[in-house]
Amino acid sequence: MTGEGAPLRIGVFGGAFDPPHLGHTALAQIAISQLGLQRLVVIPTGHAWHKARPLTDAKHRLRMAELAFSPVPGTYVDPRETLRDGPSYTVDTLRELQAENPGAQLYLLIGEDQAQRLKTWHHWERLPALAIICVAARADSSGAYGRFDDLANDIPGLTVLQMPPMAVSATDIRQRVASGKSIAPLVFEPVARYIDQHLLYRSD
Ligand code: ATP
């Protein structure tokens, strides 16, 4: 607790995590320290309706997320979205977490690319009532970074996480593995070992 009567601060960090990389763990660490989170729930997506390609089996993504986030204290991997039938929606997950943690303040953590698409999410207009939306800047391929003005007009209470740009993406990691390149500087070593042992991402 932050003090007498202060609400528990719980971060909620969803993603495909296919695979989880050092950009994800950096975002988690920055959110914990900048927002004073007591807990961070990492939620790998089930059927991610907004991702064009089929995702790697949830059992691998869950295990890799456990490995990737294990150095970040207070962080837990929650399988709930992978157990849902059909599409998984953030609005449902936040509602469930709120019901399970009465009085807690939820913080929804998202990277800039997802934030720019937020208005396409299922019932996105309900999200600000459920959680404080926190966006981490992320450089895109043109180098554009930290453009939140439009979003801030639409989302009351939008919070920006001060994160230096980290040019790492799961797409790049999958492509590197498929072409036999090293991913050593991009993922936590146990994740790289897991990918190797389970022959993941061998074909793009
Ligand atoms: P892909 O390349 O397959 O689209 P990704 O690297 O974007 O994957 P996700 O699992 O889709 O990884 O990301 C989960 C969340 O983390 C998203 O909100 C995304 O914006 C954010 N994120 C991922 N990488 C970074 C990064 N380098 N900097 C800031 N945010 C990031």
Image (tube, grey):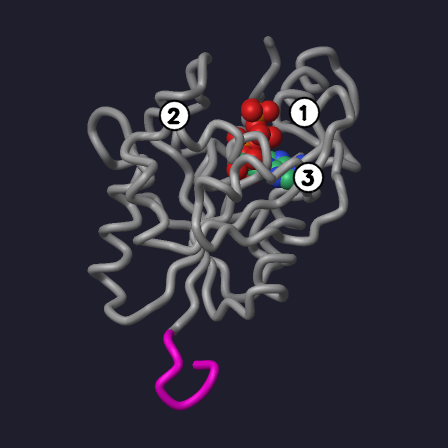
Q: Quadrant of residue 125?
A: top left
Residue picked out by circle 1: 173
Label 2, label 1: how many angstroms apart (C-alpha)?
A: 26 Å
Three-letter code, disc 2: Thr
Q: Quadrant of residue 145?
A: top right
Nearer the N terminus, badge 3 or badge 2?
Answer: 2
Three-letter code, disc 3: Gly
Does ligand 1 reach within 8 Å of label 2's beta carbon?
no
Bin the neighbour count of mark 2 within 10 Å (Cα to Cα): few under 14, some 14-19, many 20 and up: few
Label 1, label 3: how many angstroms apart (C-alpha)?
A: 23 Å
Residue picked out by circle 3: 146
At mark 2, the secondary structure is helix
| Picture residue at 50% right of the left edge, 48% below the top | 109
At mark 1, the secondary structure is helix
At mark 3, the secondary structure is loop
46 or 166, nearer to the observer: 166
| Picture residue at 43% right of the left edge, 51% below the top | 156
Label 3, label 2: how many angstroms apart (C-alpha)?
A: 20 Å
The answer to whether one can see residue 12 in this image is yes
Residue picked out by circle 2: 120
Instruction: Note whether 87 is above or below 134 in the view shown.
Output: above
Three-letter code, disc 1: Ile
Q: Which quadrant would the N terminus be assigned to in this image?
A: bottom left
Write the start and end of the magenta stretch as one range: 1-7
- Rendering coords of residue 20 (x, y %): 58, 37
Is 6 magenta? The answer is yes
**Of the residues tagged 1 and 3, which is closer to the observer?**
3
Ligand 1, image quadrant it occupies: top right
